[in-house]
Amino acid sequence: MEIQSLWVEVGGNRIHYLATGPADGRPVLLLHGASFRAETWREIGTLELLAKEGFRVVALDLPGFGESPGAEVDTETFLIDVLRELGIRKPVVVSPSMSGRFSLPLVIAAPPRTSGYVAVAPVAIPKYRSRLKRILVPVLAVWGENDNIVPHAFQNMLVETAPYARKVIIPGASHAPYMQDANTFHAELLRFLRELPPQGD
């Protein structure tokens, strides 16, 4: 299935993204860490895999990464604005590392603006500790066994506070487990996506 390279204007800033999969599929929004970009998800096969499974997949280049020019944006509202401009309703958000600064404000928003949250060792969990109980959608917290950047204590904090959360530890992997063991990551991601309630519930 074709992977399109597209642009959207958000708050006067041009933001690049990749998109694939059927237009009526459950939307999945892929973010990235500080060392990566939207293209990373093409390189490891995530875009193609999810599209073949019937999902509508959007991989975003956050401001200053990939092809998106640098811009000062409000991390509290940026993704809300992106979803509005793209016409995406209640995506499952996959958020590694640095992108936690953008995704956590989105998933704690009320009423819920997402249908699931795949937290891949995202930063900023302690900042939002008192509000994690507001995450009312299913959460999959994925950490590499040897992550020495975002402590496993933060994984436990998220899982123990968010009402519908479970954790996965990928053996032998470090801070970017989706890069070091893409097969295991993809298997856990698909399992999580298949367990979600149907869209509209």
Image: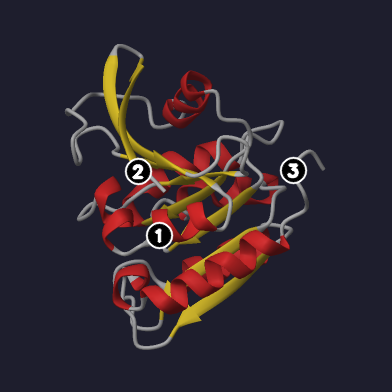
Question: What is the number of the mark on residue 46?
Answer: 1
In terms of image quadrants, where is residue 121? bottom left
The answer to whether the residues at label 3 and label 2 have Cβ atoms under 8 Å apart is no
Sequence-wise first label, 2 or 1: 2
**Residue 124 in the image, given as x and y percentages of width and height:** 42, 51
Residue 55 in sight in this render: yes
Residue type, numbered disc 1: Thr
Q: Which of 43 and 137 is in front in this view?
A: 43
Residue type, numbered disc 2: Ile
**For the view shown, which residue lies furthest in the bottom direction?**
172
Q: Would you call the spot at circle 3 few (<14 residues within 10 Å), some (14-19), or many (20 or more)?
A: few
Question: What is the number of the mark on residue 3?
Answer: 2
Q: Is residue 79 above or below residue 118?
A: above
**For the view shown, which residue lies furthest in the front direction?**
1
Q: Is residue 78 above or below residue 144?
A: above
For residue 1, side relative to residue 133 (left or right): left
Q: Which label sits in the foreground, 2 or 1?
A: 2
Q: Which label sits in the foreground, 3 or 2?
A: 2
Coloring applied to the structure: secondary structure
**Residue 12 in the image, given as x and y percentages of width and height:** 30, 11
Residue type, numbered disc 3: Gln
Q: Which of 51 and 162 is in front in this view?
A: 51
Sequence-wise first label, 3 or 2: 2
Residue matched to label 3: 199
Sequence-wise first label, 3 or 1: 1
Element type at mark 1: helix
The residue at the point 23 percent across, 53 percent down is 36
Element type at mark 2: loop
Q: In this view, does 178 lie above or below 110?
A: below
